[in-house]
Image: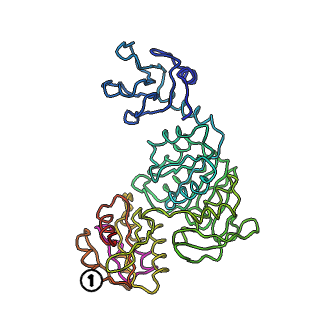
Amino acid sequence: MNSLSVKQVRTILSGKLIQGSDDVMIHHGAYRLKQIKHPHTIFFARANIVNWEQLKNFFPLVLVTSRDFSVDNQLRDLTVIKVEDVEKAYWQFVHYYRSLFDLPIIAITGTSGKTTTKEMIRHILSFDKTITATNNTNNSRTAHLQYLLSIDHDTEAAVIEAAVGAPGDVLRAGEYFKPTIGIITNIGAHHLNYCKTPEAYIAAKGEMIEALHHEGVLIINADDVNSKKLDLTNYRGRIIKVGTSQGCDFKAENIHYWQNGMKFTLVHKKQQYPLFVPGFGGHQVYNALSTLAAVYEVGMNIPEAAKRLASFQNLNKHLQMHEGINQSTILDDTWSITTTSLEAALKVINEIGKDKKKIAILGTLTDLGSWGYVIHEKAGEIIHRIGVDVLITIGMHAKIMADQAVKLGLQAEVYTFQNSTLVYNLLERLTDEHTIILIKGDMYSTPIIELARNIRKKQ
């Protein structure tokens, strides 16, 4: 964070100094008590603080409050700024701090591929720039302030994930970061427990358009069915289309599997560039296309970006390959599970496991609310369409996938379990060196995570 004096902040907020000094410097910010972790923090207090003892280790502290506060000589290292409205003062502070910086800020949303695309962009730009980025998938709204304040005078670009847990989340991220480049990787079906309907979920992802204030650069997957449903008629900024179809600004051709990744030809402005992206699957090509479009907008030339992309290390538990039980091959894809990522993973196992017995172990799709049954049936349709040799589901709702796939005529051995207790013994019987196993669930599914760990060869 760029350091600010109490006087600077007080002037911005039109606040009154009740206690302390205008000369105190501010190096951190917080709007929840648990976010106070360092001295010299400005804290926007929406309620009275009952226990000052727990905060004394973080003095000097700057308190912004709208409540009456009497000068307290026991709190001599506390500076107090009185404002009329704490919420309004907080957003004045946020907007002012963001206004201090004129730099590219790339915001990424989508059902799948957000984290990978963000990490690819960070990897490429970090070779010669100072980059601020969200960490892993810690992209909740409560983390926005800390990421914003991590931008300082040395930062040359920022890359942030704008996840959708509920309608308004992307808009809220836009209020903090005011992105100049927005990416929508794809739109599947997720978080329907809060978005309520698939249409509302599509609209929630489409908030990226408003987050860009209908200007700037929007990068969109031209091949994605749901992304085509977004209303772009009033968008005044530039739209960059990525994909494999005609009319794409960044188009992938000649896509094929290679050692530990994908090779393809990038066509951009009538020029062709050979590309390699680590990580298996056509979805990884789309991640790479969005990445290349973004870094090109930041000023990176494509040959240099391609060279840097080739050294990217694919993320943990994203179709990560291991040697497994009975010398089988394991594809650990236990980071998340949606219909979008399930389809991508099944295509990968079918491609790289052409000469092997293909086993898919699948957990429950989460955050679907009342749409759980319908979306699990759609997952079953995907399984039937792409196919595997052995299907194992774990969990009551995951069984819906298996039942639907069988109903549609899936030609495979099918096993359904309420938990993972008996799965290991089954795999001991079914697997050998000619077997490849896809295990897929989300990061919060403890049984799936433990099973993935147990079936890998111990190092």
State the image coordinates of residue 165 (x, y, percent, origin top left).
44, 51
Q: 328 or 161: which is nearer to us? A: 328
Residue 397: in magenta span: yes
Residue at the spot x=64%, y=77% of the render? 254
Residue at the spot x=36%, y=72% of the render? 401
> Vertically, is 101 above or below 187?
above
Which quarter of the rendering shows the C terminus?
A: bottom left
> Vertically, is 381 above or below 441?
below
Which quarter of the rendering shows the N terminus?
A: top right
Q: 333 or 224: which is nearer to us? A: 333
Residue 398: quarter of image: bottom left
Give the magenta-colored segment's residue range: 380-402
| Residue on which the image places disc 1 | 429
> Vertically, is 173 above or below 301?
above
Whether residue 408 is visible to the viewer of this picture, yes or no, is no
State the image coordinates of residue 393 (x, y, percent, origin top left).
32, 72
Residue at the spot x=44%, y=47% of the render? 140
Q: Is residue 421 found left or right of 143 in the rendered image? A: left
Whether residue 268 is visible to the viewer of this picture, yes or no, is yes
Residue 428: in magenta span: no
State the image coordinates of residue 29 (x, y, percent, origin top left).
47, 32
> Vertically, is 407 above or below 47?
below
Secondary structure type for disc 1: helix
What amino acid is labelled 1 in the image?
Arg
State the image coordinates of residue 376 (x, y, percent, origin top left).
38, 68
Residue 76: quarter of image: top left
Residue at the spot x=48%, y=67% of the render? 340
Q: Is residue 66 found left or right of 281 in the rendered image? A: left
Q: 133 or 213: which is nearer to us? A: 133
Task: In the displayed orientation, state which residue is furthest to the front.
Answer: 459
